Each structure stands twice: as structure tokens, then as C-alpha cells.
Image: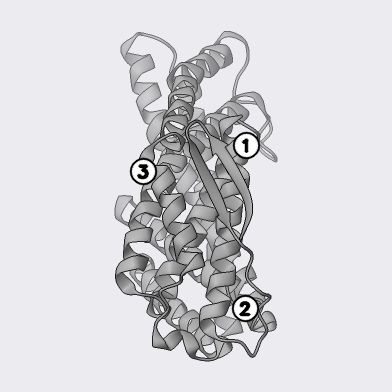
Amino acid sequence: MTDAVNTTGDHASVAPRRPRPVTREGSAGRALLQYLHEQVHVLHEQDPRVRENAPDAVHTMRTATRRLRSALASYRSLLDPETADRLRDELRWLAGVLGIARDAEVLHERLRDEVTEEPAGRGARLGAGASTGATANAIDELLASGVQSAQLTVLDVLNSERYFQLLASLAELLENPPLSSEANLPSRRVARNEIDADVTRLRRAVGTAQALPAGTERDRALHDVRKRAKRLRYAAEAAVTVDPKRASRMVALARGLQEALGEHQDSVVARTVLVRLGAEAHARGEDAFGFGRLHALEEMRATAAEVRFRRHWRALLRAL
């Protein structure tokens, strides 16, 4: 009946049974359910690891949550729409909580590394002695407490009734799937149509971003492109079993876009924090030079990320 049972407090989260393997000639509904099952399995697998603060557990759980949300969006027509939308809303909530913890951790590590490591190909370190120490201490003071607070929030959420209800709803989806008539269509045909639709959405987002001058609006537009690339990647991942050659190629191309723009977005967030830290240091009469150097480094990293994005985008267009 089930794969495993994870017990936490007075609750038991039950992992649904594994579905039969999907073939290329199978239905779209079965292919979707297998992919959803794989991601739900990751949620159950990572739950105890997140509670133990194991390395990369939050990141892995967050990624599975995003994959579930994306699949329910891309292949919504295969399911009862109300069920799909309700689960997407709850998965968005969980991913948001996990994201706060993960993003805080990544930002802290990123800025700490930039303070202490020599920027490749740019000669000297950020600084030395008291200036570097003061910069590192200010980063720790602002961000380390945020990481700890976010981790505690995650634990509270994993012990909440809402979280356990989400797991139960996912199990119910897999045990008694509310499939639509379109779920009986051939899996490869449905997957190709959805991937094509996601490519169209991505094209529109890229066109919007490229039409904007450098600045805040363009940064937001590139972040939207990243989201579209991520949705395309996950839609293609769900299709690898039924359309391995085309879907695998699209996964790789979309991942390149996503990673380049992920670096760009990390730089946008980091620069916002550095402006705040520099202003606070200046107001206290302290040396803010280190924060300015870090800001300049982040600008260069963002520029390099945009160059990589354009290269990956040209590669994707050539592959269509």
C-alpha cells in the first residue's frame, strides 16, 4: 500500500506506493503521475534531513516542491483543475518558506566568500586587516541571525497541521488521481505540446527583458525569464521517460538559462544588501570601502551572468 511512513510527533506522513514504470507508448496521465510520485518521494525523504539541518536538505526539498508546482502548472489539463490549483497554492507556500531559509544561507555564504577569497583574475584581495574584518563582521551580524531565524521558521512549518495536510493531499492525489479525459492521450504528444507552449512563454519573457534598458525593471524582467526557463526545464524533465532525446536536450538548454539568470538574481539581491550595509557603516562613521568593493565585484558578476544568458539563449534558439 505504501513505501514508507515518517512519524513526527503525533503525525504520520505516509509516502504513496510506487506506480508501475511508464513506457513511451503510455498515457500522459500515467507519465505525469510517475513524475509527481518521484518528487513526493523526495519530500518524504528530505523531511527528516531538514529537521536535522543536514547539508543541502532544504535546497533539495525546495527543488522537489518547485518541480511539483511546475508540473501541476504545465500539465494542469491532465487533472481536475481545482485540485491542481489548490495543491499549487499550498506548494507555493511551502516553497516560499523553504526559499527564505535557503536564500539567506546562500547570500551569507556568497558575501563571506567574497570577503575572504581572492577574486579570480582580478589581482588583489578585497582588503586586509581591520577593514576586511569589519566588513565580514557586519555581514555576519546582519545575515547569520537571519539564517538561524529562517531555519527555526522551517521547523515550525514542518510541524504544522497545514504541512501535514499538504502531504496527505499529495498522497491522495497519487492514490486516487482526478485525471481528466486528456490524461488518456499519448504521453509523448502531450509532452511535446506542453514543452512547445513553455518555449513560447519563454520567448515572450525574453523579448520583454531585451527591450528594457539596464536597471531595476530589466532585473525584474530577467528574473521572470528565469522563472519561465525553470518551468520549461521541469516540464521537459517530466517528459524524459517518454521523449528522451528531445526532452533531455531541452532540460540541458533550459538549465543553462536558469543557472545564468540565477547568478544574476543572486547578484541583484547581494547588491541591495551591500548598499544597506555600506550606508549603515557610513552613518556610524566607519569605513564603508569594503562594501563598495564588493558591490563593484557583484556588478561584474551580474554582467558576466548576462553574457552567459545570451549565449545559452542563442543555443536554445538554434535547437528549436
Depth check: give the residue in front, 230 or 89: 89
Residue 71, image x and y in percent?
47, 68
Lateral position of residue 40 relative to residue 243, left or right:
left
Residue 159, image x and y in percent?
44, 34
The mark lying in front, picked from 1 and 3, is 3
In whole angstroms, how far apart are the C-alphas of marks 1 and 3?
19 Å
Instruction: Please give the label number shown on residue 247.
Output: 2
Quarter occupied by residue 120: top right
Residue at 59% in and 25% down: 115
Tag 2–tag 1 contact (CB < 8 Å)? no
Instruction: Tell me the quadrant of the picture where the N terminus can be found.
Output: bottom right
Q: Which residue is mark 3?
A: 162
Q: Earlier in the sequence, mark 1 or mark 3?
A: 1
Give the residue furthest to the front: 1
Report the amino acid beneath label 3. Answer: Arg
Depth check: give the residue in front, 313 or 146: 146
Q: Earlier in the sequence, mark 2 or mark 1?
A: 1
Assess disc 1: are there few (<14), some (14-19) or many (≥20) residues with their C-alpha within 10 Å of its C-alpha.
some
Instruction: Please give the label number shown on residue 176.
Output: none
